[in-house]
Amino acid sequence: AQKVTQAQTEISVVEKEDVTLDCVYETRDTTYYLFWYKQPPSGELVFLIRRNSFDEQNEISGRYSWNFQKSTSSFNFTITASQVVDSAVYFCALRASSGTYKYIFGTGTRLKVLA
Amino acid sequence: DAGVTQSPTHLIKTRGQHVTLRCSPISGHKSVSWYQQVLGQGPQFIFQYYEKEERGRGNFPDRFSARQFPNYSSELNVNALLLGDSALYLCASSLGGLAGPGDTQYFGPGTRLTVL
């Protein structure tokens, strides 16, 4: 079975604080893809990053960074120096190489950045 | 370039009615997927289409159906609406084909369906 768990339902931080959003996944496939999406109040899911299972390099993009660890089946997302505009619901998703190629989403983490 | 567009933005129906939701993918994308997002949950996969053929179906009843047109736009139809069908319906487009499972899906703004 494939599953994505985002144990943090809601996180509140004060602006300029760093925050890490956790994502743990389950799959039996050896090749798979992991994604992070941001969903602001408008509702549209905004693509942030895609990682392949065979590439464990961590990645930094501006204030965003991602830590992918196959040994712990985790794909965590860190926002450095958070801003009010970062307030949104963040979803982690898994797509296996077999089957229908559907995305399996976690339940999301609501991030509130307070001014 | 325009992103994924969906219509209508909002829709209110009563139980038992039928609804059609529409989606236009990003230019050049040939695959469209539909997801249902109930309040407080992550999106749940409903269908995926590529080149007008169904590529995958999620765990939804036969009341849900979809199709893809030659211009790659898509419709999602839901018959005999139930209160539990109230949700945000998201359409996602992707290149499809040889892009394989790493194909990134780009989502539209969604259609908010309320069933009374």
Image: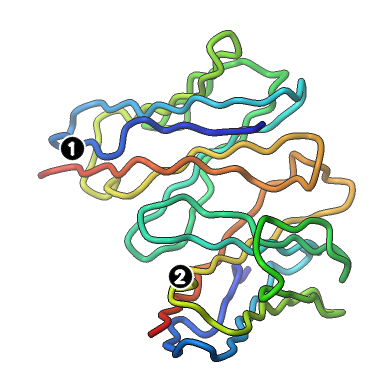
Image position, residue A83 (x, y; %): 23, 41
- Local SS, label 1: strand
Is A91 placed left or right of A93 in the picture?
left
Q: Nearer the viewer, residue B28 or B101?
A: B101
Is B43 placed left or right of A30 in the picture?
left
Quadrant location of the C terminus of chain B?
A: bottom left
Image position, residue B72 (x, y; %): 80, 74
> What mark, if any, has residue A12 been given in the picture?
1
What kind of residue is marked 2?
A: Gly
Q: Chain of mark 1?
A: A
Give the farthest residue toward the left: A115
Which of the two discs, 2 and 1, sits closer to the camera?
2
The answer for how far apart the CA atoms under marks 2 and 1 are is: 30 Å
Given contact means CB atoms under 8 Å apart, are the residues at marks 2 and 1 in contact?
no
Rendered position, A35 above or below B17 = above
Q: Chain of mark 2?
A: B
Q: For the residue carrying disc 1, how many other residues have a C-alpha within 10 Å: few (<14), some (14-19), or many (20+)?
A: few
Is A89 placed left or right of B79 in the picture?
left
> What mark, if any, has residue B84 been given in the picture?
2
Image position, residue A64 (x, y; %): 41, 31
Which corner quadrant of the image does residue A68 belong to? top right
Q: Nearer the viewer, residue A25 or A54?
A: A25
Residue drawn at the location 73% of the way across and 35% of the way down: A96
What kind of residue is marked 1?
A: Ser
Discs 2 and 1 carry the same chain letter: no
Give the farthest residue toward the top: A71
Which corner quadrant of the image does residue B77 belong to? bottom right
Residue drawn at the location 79% of the way across and 56% of the way down: B56
Residue drawn at the location 53% of the way across and 33% of the way down: A4
- Local SS, label 2: helix
> What mark, if any, has residue B12 been given in the picture?
none
